[in-house]
Amino acid sequence: MRFMVMIKANKDTEAGVLPSEELLAAMGKYNEELVKAGVLLAGEGLQPSSKGARVKFSGDKRTVIDGPFTEAKELVAGFWLFQVKSLDEAIEWVKRVPNPTGEESEIEIRQVFELEDFGTSEAVKHHEQLREHLRKP
């Protein structure tokens, strides 16, 4: 099972404040543990929403909305992608994360859909072929 683990943004992450050297070192150690355990598939910090955009869909119409976006607590500041056996295992790993802000913070865990979850339609087979193509060096 794969799980997306999302660190919620706050006023500091949205202001572009970088983590302290101490936090970077602690996160590096934590990420190393994830790699050694074969859990980490990907993980990155994200730039503030002021450097991003959203695309709003309304029927065939597309509207681009430039950042920054309000409600920092609803935004994502960083993520990991875990490969684990269960939600409980993902939770146990997340409990070990160094506090991302040093203050009150929140990390969200969401299971990723697997292609098998969608059956065996032609569209699913096409997605499987694309995934295999991406795996090739």
Image (cartoon, rainbow, N blue to C red):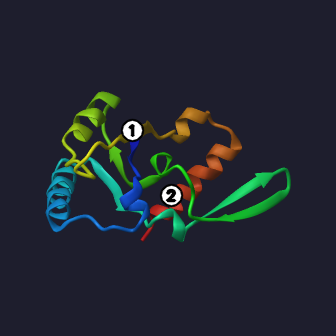
Going 61% across and 51% down the picture, which residue do you hit?
A: 127
The image shows residue 19, relative to residue 129, as above or below, that is below
Pointer 2 or 1: first along the chain: 1
User: Dividing the image into 4 quarters, which one contains the N terminus?
Assistant: top left
Residue 109 badge: 1
Q: Locate the C terminus by quadrant.
A: bottom left
Q: Residues within 10 Å of mark 1 (few under 14, many from 20)?
A: some
Image coordinates of residue 79 in percent, x first then y, are 38, 53
Up-down relation of residue 54 to residue 122 (above or below): below
- Residue at 40% across / 56% down in the picture? 11
Residue at horizontal 44 percent and vertical 38 percent from the top: 110
* Residue furthest to the right: 60
Image mark for residue 51 = none
Q: Separation of disc 2 and disc 1 at Cα?
A: 26 Å
Left or right of 47: which side holds 63?
A: right
Q: Nearer the viewer, mark 2 or mark 1?
A: 1
Horizontally, is 54 left or right of 45 in the view?
Answer: right
Question: Which sits in the foreground, 116 or 29?
Answer: 29
Q: How far across and how far down the image is residue 74, in percent?
A: 50, 46
121 or 14: nearer the viewer: 14
Q: Quadrant of residue 16?
A: bottom left
Q: Position of residue 38 (x, y in %)?
A: 23, 49
Where residue 43 appears, as percent x and y from the top left, is: 34, 58
Q: Which residue is mark 2?
A: 132
Q: Secondary structure at mark 1?
A: strand
What's under tag 1, amino acid-wise? Ile
What type is the residue that disc 2 sits on? Glu
Q: Nearer the viewer, residue 137 or 17?
A: 17
* Circle 2: element type: helix
Q: Residue at x 68, y 38 (%)?
A: 121
